[in-house]
Each structure stands twice: as structure tokens, then as C-alpha cells.
Image (cartoon, rainbow, N blue to C red):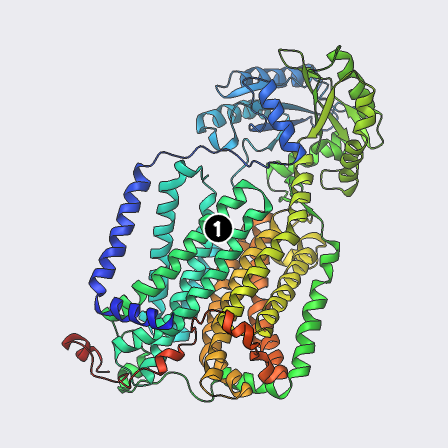
Amino acid sequence: MATFLYRLGRTAFRRRWYVALMWVAVLGALGLGAAKAPAAPDEGMSMPGIESQKAFDLMEERFPGSTADGATARVVFVAPDGQKVTAVGNRSAIEEFVDEASAGREVASAVNPFEARAVSKDASTAYATVNFKVIADKLGDADKKSIEDAIDEVRDAGLTVEVGGDALAGQPAAGGAAEAIGIAIAALVLVLTFGSMAAAGLPLLTAVLGVGVSMAAITALASTFGLSGTTGTLAMMLGLAVGIDYAMFVVSRYREERAKGHAPQEAAGLATGTAGSAVVFAGLTVVIALAGLSVVGIPMLTKMGLAAAGAVVIAVLISLTIVPALLGFWPNAVLSRGTRKSGTVKEGGEHNGGSRWARFVLRRPVTVLLLSVVGLGVVAIPVTGLQLGMPGAEVKSTSTTERRAYDALADGFGPGFNGPLTFVVDAKGADDPKASVTTISEEVGAAKGVVSVSPAQFNPAGDTAVFSAVPSTGPSDKATKDLVQSLRDGRPGIEAATDGASFQVTGTTAVNIDIAQKVQDALIPYLVVVVGLAIVLLLVVFRSLLVPLKAALGFLLSVLAALGAVVAVFQWGWGAELLGVTETGPIMSLMPIFLVGIVFGLAMDYEVFLVSRMREAYVHGDRPAQAVVSGFRYSARVVVAAALIMMAVFSGFIGAGESMIKMIGFGLAIAVLFDAFVVRMAFVPAVLALLGDKAWYLPRWLDRLLPDIDVEGEALTRRPATLTAVPDNPADREAARV
């Protein structure tokens, strides 16, 4: 492996024009394909295997022309103090709104609140539900404006009007200015790390190139593979993250090899052969984590994971080819300013910050190990109270109309009104469908925790009906989850009272409950698959039994601590005001899977880059303790810089207005903090110090079975001593002069 990549790096350096033109051609071809490719149909978020999805599918089949997951606007009308919505003027304004809304081109139905009993008992509040034929993303500006104009007319009549649902809701946005600041901080970290604008800019340039190629490929293939507009989000984020990291490590190793006296082309080859080997296997661990998302069984998540895995593969290829090629164009520009001025190449000292910290840990390994494990364990304690769900309007800021609509409905109709349960009754096999539906409706209405049941609506064929039930508790309340489970558990008894009808429970609340359960059930298999495959891969990389196990244990500590911190802030409310979180609620259902997948990939990146240098030093003759010091001397600074960059980028999401985006940004940033600075910088060296030679033990029989991939570049040290030879051509000879 190291020898092959060494040759690849030298070739890319020497044939830099060909390599650069090749990548430009690839980007151009994919860009052209993306521009001409038809847009992929947005199929929404399908969740096969859960009852809620089955009910949606049945509704779409039995109610022709309707879309079960079409956009909805729930328009809430609140009368001024002392008035009622049933007053003549107020009622007239509301009914005029319903008539205007019904005329909308994409409107499937607009329900009059006075006909649908959608008026509160004190007549202070009413609501009209506007159902659309298409999902929210497909609604045009003209369709939205017609509804908004009708709402403004009601407001002019003196009523307070708020709008819930997804039809008119603003799309969640990332951190805006805060995210831009995060990227600026990342650039500053690169400049401070390398002391060179060129060295700082090269990783950013190649990472942007990789993201461009990846996104163009995803767009070009979107229609063929049914990729939605959100599929590339994770690919863009991770492609940028690992693209910067991988280029950083190659550039850092190039500077180190130049400091040893190697000519530019030779240094590029050695950097690609050693750091490049680590890049390949770090990339493989990330690909395993992302491709493993298919275990969850959610098509959207599978597509996002595979698309992001493709972006990581492209980032690896770019770091192995275009990075050494760009070093060929500017071989001295990436060296520090002081080096270029003095004419002497120096990179890293015997006693830099990394080596001093490693010696500190080696003197107190037990203390450092206990502090790191206990500290992360304490932070992880809130995980025991983890409640998964899909935070809705209740966690939005009170400055949004969605939140005000939520509060108005809760005040007027009760907390459960914002999360009604939808019952789909299949009476196709019943002798008397209407009687069967009535029986089921009455049984559901009599259940403890159900406040009211709406009249059933039948399809044109008369064999399927839909009705809703309002629980007494809010959508994210545990009692609501228990109610759904109780109704499903009691289904055999309810259906037995009919003459062949059956029912299923769906609706937003039930969907969120089902998704949370599906993700929770998939989390352990996902961890087993991903961590198991990664342990096998690290076993090959490090040729050690204990190092991969230590890496997996460290990752579990960091991800559990990160989840604990997320629960403490977003579910319990500890320090929530510092992040601008106005309301707490359940943790987003997909958060654990996202956190495990993304953080595992980044954690294994840091593990491979840091420990591979230790392994390299150990293979080349260092004692175990000295190998730890050597690894930190050469890699700690770059690993810390990479972690700071990731934290800066992820922290940009904390500045978003949406609670869910804040949660993602905070969770990823805090996970990188724990993993890079507690696990990799404290836990890892402490464990290796205590294990000594045992850390690198591998049974002989297993050593013979494993392929020898030579990540540490041992084969390169056995080559003839031509490393400081005169460069291969006049241009490189001139470039070698510092």
C-alpha cells in the first residue's frame, strides 16, 4: 500500500498538469450532466415497515386524488377579548376565508370550522384546516400568496390569525452569519497551524473541489436513483469536513519530509505513501459508518449515507492526487513564512506541545485514564432519560406564527389537540362497513386518554373510512405514546366486535412515535455492524488486538457523553438559554443515528492519524512510551487543528433559529470536543502507556492470516538511500531551493 501510494504521489507531483486538467475535466463533465439532468421527484420521507406508513399507503390507495402526506395549513382564529368567533362579523370573515382558500389551484379541501365543530367551547377560538394536493416543497409562491392574502383580510376584520402546519412554514436554515464565522475560524486555525496562507488555503481549495465534484455527481444521478433535494446535505457537510482533514494530513507530512532534507517530489511521494495510507483507511472507516446507515431501514437515510460515502471516497482520491499535484506547482509556498525567509526547512521540534503533553500523560497514566473515563461517564448519565421524538412547533420561538398557533389551539381545545391521532379503517371485507366504522369509532372514543373523536369520512367506494381522535395530552408527552400503544395492543378486541373491519393508527404524532421506535430498535444492530467492521479494519491497519478495541471503547465513551450533553441541554433545559433554546422537548429521533455515524467516522479519522504515527515509530524501533511521544510530536498539532476546524464549522449551526438545527450543531461540536480532546488526547495515550508492548501484540497465527498493507511505510525505509537525491527535472531542482 505505502509503496503504491508513494509512486502515485510522485507521479501526481511530476505530471501535475495532467492531474489538474483531469480533475477539471471531471468537474466540468459532471457539472454539465447535472445541468442537463431532469429533476428527481421528491417522494417525501417514506418509512417502510411502520404502521403509520402502511396507513398512509392505504389512504392514498383508497382515496383517489388525495395525498396522505400533502401539505397542510391549520389557520387559527382568535377573537378579541370579550368577543366570540361566532359573532356575525367574525363568522362572516372566517367563512369568506374558507371560500377564498377553497378556490386555490393546489387546494384539495378547506374545512369550514363552523361545519366541522372546530370551535372551542367558549367560542374564543376556531380553526380551519386547508389541505393541499402536493407536499409543501411543491407549493408555488402564487399558491402560498393566495392563502396569505386571504389571511390578511381576516386580520383586517379584527381577528388574530396564526398559521400552523407545514404549508406556509419557513424552511429551516443553517446558522447564517454564525456559520460564516465558523468557516472563518476554521481558516484562521489553518493559518495558525501551518504559518502559511498557501498551506492553509490548499486544504480548503481541494475540499471545495471535492464537494463540487460530489454535489455535481449527486445532482446528475438524482433522477436515476431517486435522490431527493436533501440527500446531498450530509454529503456536502462531511465532504467538506474530511476533505479539509485529509489534505491537512498530507500537507503536514510533506512539510515534515521536507524538513528531513528530501527534495520536493520525493517529499510529496513519501507524504502520500505514509499519510496517504492513513487517509485511505481513515476514509474506509467513514465509508463503513455511512454505508451502515442502510441497517436502519429508512430509504432516505440509506440514500443520504451512500451519497455521503461517495463524497468521502472522492475526498480520499483528491487528497492522493490533486494535493501532491498542487504541491508540485508551489512546492515551497506551503512552507512556513519563517522557513522561506531563513532558507532552512524546519518542521516540528523534539519538545513541542504535543510531546510535552504526551510525557505528562505517561507520568500519570492512571490518573488521566480515571479522570477521562469518569468525566465522560458523568456527562453521559442523562442518556438514561433519553426521550426520542420529533420536536414540533412547541419548541419553536414564540416569535413564529407556528408556535403561536400551537399555543392558541392548546389554550382553546386542550394540549392534545395539536397531535390528533388518525385512524384508517379498512372495511372492505365487512358486511356493513358503516356499522363497523361506527363500532371502532365508539371504542376508540371510550378509551382512557381520548378526549373526542371526529365524524368518520368515507371514500367514494364506501369501503374505507378515516376519523381522528384527540388525546388529552400533548404530542410529545409520554402519556400520548402510551395511549397509541394501548390502542394498538387492544386492536384484536376492538376488531372482534366488528364483522371483518380492521384499523390502523397514523397521523403526525403516531408517525413520530413509530420513527422513534424504529430508530431505537436499529441503533444496537447499527453499532454492532459499524463498530465490528471498523475493529476488523483497524486490526489490519494496526496489527494489534487491543488498539482497535481501545478505539471502539473510546468512541462509545465520547458518543454517549455527547448524547448525554444533548439530553441535558435540549430535553432537560440545562444551560439552554445560553444557546438560545426557548423550549425543551424530546430529542430528534434521527439524532442518535446521525451522531453515531458522523462522529464515528471523524473519531476513527483522528484515531488512525494519531495512532498510525505511534505504530510507525514503534515499528521503526522506538520503545512503547517513546512511540507515544513520537506520535504526539508529529500528529497532535494537526489532529487538534482538524478538531477545532470541525467544531468551528459545526458550531455555526448553533446560531440557527430552528431548535433541531441547533441540536445537530451542538451535538456534533460537543462530540468532536469530547472525542478529540478527551478520548484521543488523554484516554488513548493513558491506555497505551499502561499496556506497553502488549498494546501492539498480535498472535502469530493471526499475523500470518492478515494482509500486510504497510500503513506505516516500513517498505519505504528499506528502499535505496536516494531520498535526498537531486530532483528529477530542472523545474523541480529550482523549486527545491528554499
Q: Determine the residue positioned at 35% across, 71% down.
A: 272
Amino acid type, callout 1: Leu
Most foreground residue, 439 or 121? 439
- Is residue 58 rendered to the left or right of residue 610? right
Question: Residue 610, relative to residue 629: is it above or below?
Answer: above
Q: Which residue is mark 1?
A: 234
Specify the farthest residue to the left.
Answer: 730
- Is residue 487 rendered to the left or right of residue 142? right
Task: Choose top left, top right, bottom left or bottom right for residue 362.
Answer: bottom right
Task: Choose top left, top right, bottom left or bottom right for residue 194.
Answer: bottom left
Residue 445 visible to the viewer: no
Question: Residue 509, relative to residue 313: is it above or below?
Answer: above
Question: Residue 566, relative to residue 429: is it above or below?
Answer: below
Residue 152 position in % (x across, y down): 55, 26
Residue 690 position in % (x across, y down): 64, 83
Most foreground residue, 316 or 184? 316
